Image: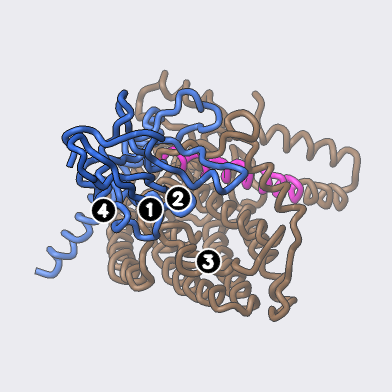
Amino acid sequence: MFIKKYIQEIWGAVKSLLKGMRRTGYYFTHHKEIITQQYPDNRETLNLPERFKGEVVMPHDENNEHRCTGCQACELACPNGTIKVIFKNELNAEGKKKKAIDKLVYHLELCTMCNLCIEACPSDAIKMAQTFEHSVFDRNELTKILNNPGSKIMDGVE
Amino acid sequence: MWSFSNIANSIHEWLSNNFNPTWTIIIEMVIAGVAVISLFALLGLVLVIMERKVSAWMQIRLGPNRVGPKGMFQSLADTLKLLVKEGLTPGGADKFLFNLAPFIAMIVAMLLMAPIAFAKDFQLWDLNIGVLFVSAVSSIMVISILMAGWASNNKYSLMGAMRSGAQIVSYELSAGLSILAVVVMTGSLQVSEIIESQRNGWWIFKGHLPMLIAFVTFIIAVTAETNRAPFDLAEAESELTAGFHTEYSGMKFALFFLAEYVNVFIVCAIGATLFLGGWMPFHIGKWEGFNHVMDYIPSSIWFFGKTFFLIFLIMWFRWTFPRLRIDQLLNLEWKYLLPISMINLLIVTAMAILGWHF
């Protein structure tokens, strides 16, 4: 029936529009839900969301050990060549030669924080940090080496 | 008690005691003009900061909060910035029409101020066809937009202006028909009589459901007429940069911007006058005590309160609803609003004849 459909359409439209207005009206009256950060003022008490992506870092434990095997998955996953893995050969306990990372070079100036390297990493060696004040006077400082000097791979990570 | 009409009367008395009638009229006209222009400036400042704050809170943001207490002087700072900016006229533009268009927009807004009753017995010109005057003059608005779009010699401007033309011309119909519903009930086009007829109750309550439908239609139509989202196809930032005022800068842009906000104020004032009783206080039937308390609130506060409530409603629409496409826009008018308001007018007429209202 044409008239029935016509009225149903109007009813549906009014209902969905009122639903939207209810939502914005709720936000209008509930100022506590405001998610904007007053950044320079609350620098000490900054409350960043969990998924905020600032830069790539490699966590080390207290023995200066990391989890990176040097599999290059991150280097391959990176769309714009931000990560470069440089290898060295290392002797392990049995005196055998073993491939390990010498430097994991990270170009912060090229990084778009797309998170693809973190998703590609099979051993959770790298993660996104929440730091974001990256401005420096010399752009060489933006080329970072993620592994600490003298660090080695954690036992049991292959 | 303090009121706008007392001030106006004392000024008039003082002038007639000191000058001859001709000079009295001239000086009063100058005072009225200055008052309207300063009201414009004030409205521009207040409505812009209101819009920015409302939009911010609806989008879970904070909005302007640096200039002055809680950012309340932000629009003043923006106005100062616009005043010192260069008003550039593009080389390929039609210079005369390009520079004339913003002034026409402002003149239309100023003309529309004439029949609005701001408080009890405080009105610039209580002409006997007030409502007709408003709906006639507000259609001149489209000329300034078309003029701006054509004279800019820019494809975006022209497209924005053409869309705006199609939109205003079609939505004028349903706005007019919903105004007619009130006129039918009242039996008069005069603004003061329309307000007087709502002494025992506003039309939105007295007129039952048909009047409510007329009110909703009116609000939708005037939102479209003032080119505001969800009907802001004339500007459509994402499609046409800024529509008809793409090429405008400095104070000429500011005039268009101001005219937009003043028009919002005017249509809301008209809506408040027709449906919410203008400056009439809110009365409930036989509750004498309650009615006396309501009478104690000054009439100007009632008028501006209702108007700003409607302005808030229109801002709420703007920051909630997505923009319509041009075909959806014309569908909404010609397939839904126009038939509904026509049938509604028929019902309202029957109600008025049979006396089915309070």
Q: Are marks 1 and 2 on the same chain?
A: yes
Which amino acid type corresponds to the residue marked 3 in the rendered image?
Answer: Thr
Secondary structure beneath label 2: strand
> Which hue belongs to chain A?
blue
- Discs 3/4, front: 4
Which class describes the residues within 10 Å of circle 1: few (<14), some (14-19), or many (20+)? some
Residue placed under numbered mark 1 in the picture:
A84
Please, which chain is the residue tagged with disc 3 on?
B
Is tag 1's residue or tag 2's residue first in the polypeptide sequence? 1
Residue placed under numbered mark 4 in the picture:
A73
Secondary structure beneath label 1: strand
Name the residue: 35% across, 35% down. Answer: A49
Secondary structure mainly formed by the magenta segment: helix
Residue placed under numbered mark 3 in the picture:
B241
**Considering depth in this image, is A45 or B33 the residue closer to the camera?**
A45
Please, which chain is the residue tagged with disc 4 on?
A
Question: What separation in Å lies between label 2 and label 4 (alpha carbons)?
Answer: 16 Å
Q: Are marks 3 and 4 on the same chain?
A: no
> Which hue belongs to chain B?
brown
- Discs 3/1, front: 1
**Considering depth in this image, is B141 or A143 the residue closer to the camera?**
A143
Which class describes the residues within 10 Å of circle 3: few (<14), some (14-19), or many (20+)? some
Which amino acid type corresponds to the residue marked 2 in the rendered image?
Answer: His
**Considering depth in this image, is B305 or B43 the residue closer to the camera?**
B43
Question: What separation in Å lies between label 4 and label 1 (alpha carbons)?
Answer: 11 Å
Question: What separation in Å lies between label 1 and label 2 (alpha carbons)?
Answer: 8 Å
Tell me where the magenta segment starts and ends, as one range. B32-59
Name the residue: 57% across, 69% down. Answer: B244
- Quadrant of the image for the N terminus of chain A? bottom left
Question: What separation in Å lies between label 3 and label 4 (alpha carbons)?
Answer: 43 Å
Q: Determine if the magenta segment contains residue B171.
A: no
